[in-house]
Amino acid sequence: MPYCKVKNANIYYEEIGAGIPIIMLHGFTPDHRLMSGCMEPVFKENDGWKRIYLDLPGMGKTMDYDLISNSDEMLKAVASFIDTKISNQPFLIIGESYGGYLTRGIIKLYKEQILGAGFICSMILPDKEKRTLPEHTIVYADNEFLSNLVEEERNDFKSNQVVLDEYNWKRYKQEILSGCNIADTAFLDKIQKNYGFSFAIDDVLFQKPTVFLLGKQDSVVGYQDAFAILGNYPRATFAILDRAGHNLQIEQTKLFTAHMNEWLDRVEEEM
């Protein structure tokens, strides 16, 4: 299995394709499958990109992360991975939820090296009490299908998705629950006590092609807080999708793939 040893972790990663590297950062608790599940279909018609999916410390198969105790040190692990794996090469970066928060930190550190950035349901404010959130709502439910799930599965599905049908359940189970079930919860509890960076990250003007995809029904990180940083990304497409919660990439697959393809087209145009 491929591992990359950095100062404060031994990071598991999967690499697919050849070309310009794209660093993929998943959210808090799942693992790299959250990103590979939604991003690999984008590259069926896009050649020339090396997709690098990593497991953040405390998640997936990454090991030896005992020295990490906050998001500053989590960021250092990702930065060390980038330095080790791709050195001074230009690269793209995509982050989902907490991975989007880390992405803003990476942009601050590597702004001149990054060709473009993607944000999927990105966490804007680490303090949950300060977030502007809609109430959790279910937009659509296939009750006949839901009756086939055991109660625990059904309740978990209802609390985390806004479109409840067989397609969404299968992907939710394969791409999200699979990682959540193997996460180091004690370690993640420790990180959440020091969830925000100790330094400012939104004092950078990033003028490369960017895409923000946000769920109108996202009750985890919301969508309204992202407006506050939109001015830092003058080349950003900013889309708020209805019928989408915190797992927008699953619930709005067609629009997600279309926006990602269009973003890659804009990146290529600038190269």
Image (cartoon, rainbow, N blue to C red):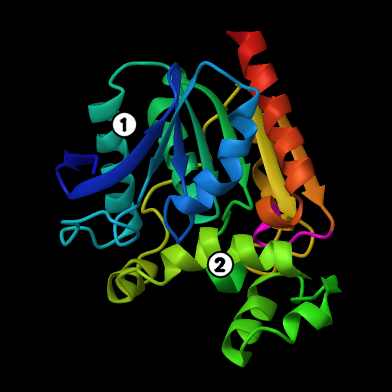
Q: Which quadrant is home to the N terminus?
A: top left
Circle 2 Cα neighbour tier, 10 Å, few/some/many (<14 / 14–19 / ≥20)? some
On the image, the x and y values in percent for residue 32 come to 43, 50
Residue type, label 2: Lys
| Residue on which the image places disc 1 | 82
How many dots with numbers?
A: 2
The correct choice, above or below, for 93 with respect to 103 in the image is: above
Q: Looking at the rendered structure, which numbered label has been put on residue 173?
A: 2
Q: Residue 234: tell me if it is visible.
A: no
User: Which region of the structure is painted magenta?
Assistant: 243-248
Q: Secondary structure at mark 1?
A: helix
On the image, the x and y values in percent for residue 67 come to 16, 58
**Quarter location, residue 210:** top right
**Quarter location, residue 220:** bottom right
Residue pictured at 76% horizontal, 76% vertical: 135
Give the left or right position of residue 12, taking residue 149 as reference.
left
Residue type, label 1: Ile
- Asked whether 97 or 180 is in front, the reply is 180
Circle 1 Cα neighbour tier, 10 Å, few/some/many (<14 / 14–19 / ≥20)? many
- Asked whether 55 or 75 is in front, the reply is 55
- Disc 1 to disc 2, how far (Cα)? 29 Å
Q: Residue 70: tell me if it is visible.
A: yes
Residue pictured at 79% horizontal, 42% vertical: 255
The correct choice, above or below, for 229 with respect to 175 in the image is: above
Give the left or right position of residue 175, taking residue 218 as reference.
left
Q: Which quadrant is home to the C terminus?
A: top right
- Asked whether 267 or 151 is in front, the reply is 151
On the image, the x and y values in percent for residue 218 come to 71, 64
The stretch drawn in magenta includes residue 246: yes
Residue pictured at 31% horizontal, 51% vertical: 74
On the image, the x and y values in percent for residue 65 come to 20, 57
